[in-house]
Amino acid sequence: MKLLTVNDVASILKARPSTIYSWAEQGIIPCFKLNGLLRFSEEAVMTWIVDCQRKPAEEYNIFAGRRPRKGGQI
């Protein structure tokens, strides 16, 4: 298991270290403390990134909850 620091994760995500600390405190990003220092498993972070991706638009029913237009066309 490869361990990453806050700066490593910030670099990967193109975010500020303060954002990474905030996400860790809120439990948004997987992390743990090792001897009082915040660390991240590279595998867990990469899995988290994949899980955060949006589904392709065709998986969503974009017309749900809308009334059909005049003439019955959507």
Image (cartoon, grey):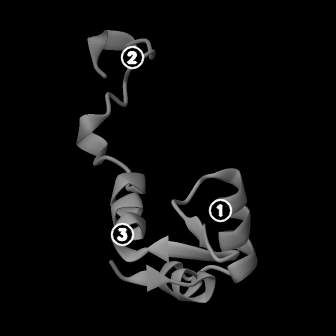
**Residue 69 percent location from the top left of the image:** 39, 16
Instruction: Identify whether 21 is placed above or below 54.
Output: below
Quadrant occupied by the N terminus: bottom left
Q: Are the residues flagged by discs 1 and 2 in contact, CB closer than 8 Å?
A: no
Instruction: Identify whether 19 is placed above or below 9.
Output: above
Query: For the image shown, how many numbered marks are present on the structure?
Result: 3
Q: Residue at x 38, y 64 (%)?
A: 44
Q: Specify whether 24 is left or right of 49.
A: right
Q: Secondary structure at mark 3?
A: helix
Residue 69 is tagged as: 2
Q: Specify whether 57 is left or right of 20.
A: left
- The answer to which of 8 and 41 lies nearer the viewer is 41
Assess disc 2: are there few (<14), some (14-19) or many (≥20) residues with their C-alpha within 10 Å of its C-alpha. Answer: few
Q: Earlier in the sequence, mark 1 or mark 3?
A: 1
Q: CA distance from mark 1 to mark 2?
A: 46 Å
Q: CA distance from mark 1 to mark 3?
A: 15 Å
> Label 3 belongs to which residue?
46
Assess disc 1: are there few (<14), some (14-19) or many (≥20) residues with their C-alpha within 10 Å of its C-alpha. Answer: some
Which quadrant of the structure image shows residue 60? Answer: top left
Which one is closest to the eye, mark 1 or mark 2? 1
Q: Specify whether 68 is left or right of 27.
A: left
Q: Residue at x 51, y 60 (%)?
A: 30
**Residue 68 percent location from the top left of the image:** 37, 13
Name the kind of residue labelled 1 in the image: Ala
Name the kind of residue labelled 2 in the image: Arg
Name the kind of residue labelled 3 in the image: Met
> Label 1 belongs to which residue?
24
Q: Earlier in the sequence, mark 3 or mark 2?
A: 3
Which one is closest to the eye, mark 3 or mark 2? 3
- The answer to which of 35 and 46 lies nearer the viewer is 35
Q: Secondary structure at mark 2?
A: loop
